[in-house]
Structure formats: C-alpha cells, structure tokens
C-alpha cells in the first residue's frame, strides 16, 4: 500500500533528474526541451522568444516557441505561458508545486472552465518548486479580470454560477478526500497564519492616509483583535461537517479571464484546497460588488449560488439561513488577503479593503466570531513576519 508520504512526494516523471530551476536565466530552450521530453519523447524546442515576464508572488513567463514536428503534432501551440517562481527575492513557499499538482491531478475532473495545460511537474522534495506549461490567455479573445472591474449584480451572479460548477464537480466525493497532497481549507499555515506572515506588508498599507480614512479605529488601536477573529474563523471552518468540495481558495475576479464568449476561466490555482465553498463565495462576491450592490443583493446572490449548486446534483447543501450564517463570517478572509496586498503586484487593494471591511461591519463579523471567547493564542504582531522586498522597505522606516 502506498504511504501518505509517498503520495505527497510522488512525481509524474520520476526519471527527470535534478531540481527545477529557481532563476529565470536557467530557463532556456535546451532546458525546456529536456523538461517536455519527459511527456513528449522526441520533442525539441529549437528556440523561443520571451513575449513578457510578469513577476509577483510567482512568475508568468509568456513565450513564443519554435517547436519541431513532434511538438506541433502534440498540439502544443506556439504561444504558451509558464508558471513557476523565478521572482528574485520572493520565496513563494509551496504554491507553485501545489498549482502544478492541481493541473496534473484535478484539471480533467472539473466542469468549470480552466486554462488548457500541456505539461506540469514538481520536485516533491519540500522545496516547493513546480512548473506548469499552459495556454497563453494573453493571446486569446477576452479580458483578464481586475479588482477595479465593475461586473454588476448580473455579472457576479454569472461568476457565482461558474463557482457552483467548480464546487459541484467533486462535491462530497471520496476521490477528493483521498487527495492527500491537497491541503484542507484553513488547516494550513498559508491560510491560518497569513495575517501574521504578511504583517509587515499590512503595515505598509496601515500607514497610508487613504487606508486610514476607511479602516475602523480598532484596526489601529487593537490590531490583535484581527488575529483573534481570524483564529476563530479557522476554528469555525474546521468544526463544520457538511460535504466538502474543491475550493479555488483565491477566487477574486483578478484570478479569472472572461472570454469574448462570456465564459469565465478561473486562473491561479496556487491556494487550491478541499473544504467548504463559502470561502470562495464570499471572497468573489464581496470583492466584486460595490458596497451598495452588496447591501441590496447579497442575500439573493447566495440563493442564486445555492440553487445552481443543487441543480448540478450536490446533496446536503445548507439551507439559505444556514448558508448566510457561513457567508457573514467570511469577510475576514478577504480583509487579511487584501490588507496585505501591494498594488505593484497588479491589483488595486484599497477598494477591496473598503468593501471587505464594510461587509464585516454590516455583518458584525468580528463580534460574531469573538464574542465571549478568549484568544486562542497570544502573539506579537510582526514577529516572524515575512520581510518586505527591498524596494518597499523604506516605506516602513520611522
């Protein structure tokens, strides 16, 4: 019988020698040829042209390939995008390996639109390195989502139906439970310690006048309350006994692509989880709606999502009232994620922070999570936090 550790480290191409590269300079046509030959014997990348390099938490490397006949016959297009971590100075942990595993193990089991992929691999040695070769959506008719795009209530409803398709595909399945490599939502340090790990980045935004104008006083006077509420959110999620599903984990509209056909493609599966769906639903909806739209339509949109999920065959779906009780606790996740956002990474964080904090106030999220409960742990904010990249450190100087 295969052990859990063997499942965790098992690689799709064990004959591949050495580690995946950590530096962009090592990504050459010769290296890419040797990589792809593990799946496509005889393939050759004669040369490639760099179309674009985008570095953030990870790297998106867009290439125009000159492939031999084997590569062309395999259906690999000229234009592809490589996802890995070749960002200098930013260690992204295991998220590149996790995304590579997702494309290898899970992509074909889903009903929701996901980018085409041609190759994925990972080292499985604890270093977190992984790589995916996928379609270059930058060449496709359509538009990448962005935090500033206004979808309107109807557009958000369509996005929720797309997420329902994702969640229904493996709803309550034993196959999903058996994926030992796949973290449980809110039971992984990247989830439950994110507020602490990214606190120095949060401090960058706390100092900005535009954030001081929208954040509640308690965020400055007793920021430890945030950590307390986030710990309670984790505990609440892990207490749930309803069916699990595949959770995108980072489902804001900036991690999607809207094809001209109207199909929404979900990208960036670096925080993929197994868990309950409300993390995805609240994260997408609360970030995409204006505050006024959310106040008028959130209840009905939760109903839209539930009805779509049930129509796809999901059983044991919570009733509307119980679903709302889940939903009103989840602004915490978006609050921590966007408060740690640096706009230079490509998304506008202020508007998202305002929306999530306003939702938390309206839903009494912090009070609901923490009332009558002592903190589960006492930590010193900033201790053990990830240091900000050199180009931002001057912003923290007193």
Image (tube, rainbow, N blue to C red):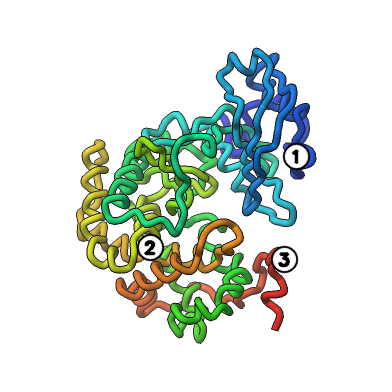
- The residue that appears at 69% across and 37% down in the rendered structure is 50
Residue 138 in which image quadrant: top right
**In front: mark 2 or mark 1?**
1
Q: Contact (CB < 8 A) between labels 3 and 2? A: no
Task: Please name whichever residue, 80 or 112, is drawn nearer the observer in this view of the structure.
Answer: 80
Residue for badge 1? 21
Q: Contact (CB < 8 A) between labels 2 and 1? A: no
Rendered image: mark on residue 391: 3
Category of crowding for the residue at label 3, using alpha-carbon neighbours closer than 10 angstroms: few (below 14), some (14–19), many (at least 20) = few
Task: Please name whichever residue, 240 or 40, is drawn nearer the observer in this view of the structure.
Answer: 40
Task: Please name whichever residue, 387 or 384, is drawn nearer the observer in this view of the structure.
Answer: 387
Vertical side of 229 occupied by 245: above or below: above
Q: Quadrant of the N terminus?
A: top right
Q: Earlier in the sequence, mark 3 or mark 2?
A: 2
Q: CA distance from mark 2 to mark 1?
A: 37 Å
Residue for badge 2? 330
């Amino acid at each position: 019988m295969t052990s859990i550790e063997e499942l965790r480290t098992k690689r799709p191409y064990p004959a591949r020698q050495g580690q995946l590269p950590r530096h962009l300079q090592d990504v050459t046509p010769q290296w890419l040829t040797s990589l792809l030959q593990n799946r496509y014997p005889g393939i050759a990348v004669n040369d490639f042209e760099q179309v674009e390099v985008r570095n953030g938490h990870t790297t998106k490397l867009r290439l125009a390939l000159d492939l031999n006949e084997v590569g062309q016959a395999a259906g690999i297009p000229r234009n592809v995008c490589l996802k890995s971590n070749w960002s200098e100075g930013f260690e992204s942990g295991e998220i590149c390996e996790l995304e590579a595993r997702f494309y290898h193990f899970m992509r074909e089991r889903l009903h929701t639109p996901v980018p085409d992929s041609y190759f994925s691999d990972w080292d499985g040695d604890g270093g977190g390195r992984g790589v995916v070769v996928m379609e270059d959506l930058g060449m496709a008719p359509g538009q990448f989502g962005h935090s500033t795009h206004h979808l309107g209530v109807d557009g958000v409803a369509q996005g929720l139906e797309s997420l329902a398709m994702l969640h229904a595909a493996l709803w309550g399945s034993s196959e999903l439970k058996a994926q030992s490599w796949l973290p449980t939502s809110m039971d992984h340090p990247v989830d439950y310690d994110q507020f602490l790990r990214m606190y120095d980045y949060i401090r960058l935004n706390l100092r900005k006048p535009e954030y001081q104008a929208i954040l509640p006083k308690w965020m400055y006077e007793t920021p430890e309350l945030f950590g307390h509420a986030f710990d309670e959110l984790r505990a609440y999620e892990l207490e749930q006994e309803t069916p699990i599903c595949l959770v995108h984990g980072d489902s804001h509209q900036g991690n999607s692509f809207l094809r001209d056909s109207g199909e929404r493609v979900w990208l960036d599966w670096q925080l993929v989880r197994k868990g309950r769906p409300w993390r995805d639903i609240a994260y997408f909806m609360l970030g995409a709606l204006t505050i006024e739209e959310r106040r008028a339509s959130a209840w009905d949109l939760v109903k839209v999502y539930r009805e779509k999920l049930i129509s796809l065959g999901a059983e044991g779906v919570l009733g509307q009232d119980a679903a709302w009780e889940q939903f009103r606790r989840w602004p915490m996740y978006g609050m921590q994620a966007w408060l740690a956002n640096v706009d230079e990474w490509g998304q506008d964080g202020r508007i998202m922070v305002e929306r999530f904090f306003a939702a938390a106030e309206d839903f009494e999220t912090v009070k609901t999570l923490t009332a009558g409960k002592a903190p589960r742990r006492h930590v010193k904010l900033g201790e053990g936090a990830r240091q900000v990249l050199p180009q931002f450190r001057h912003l923290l100087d007193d």
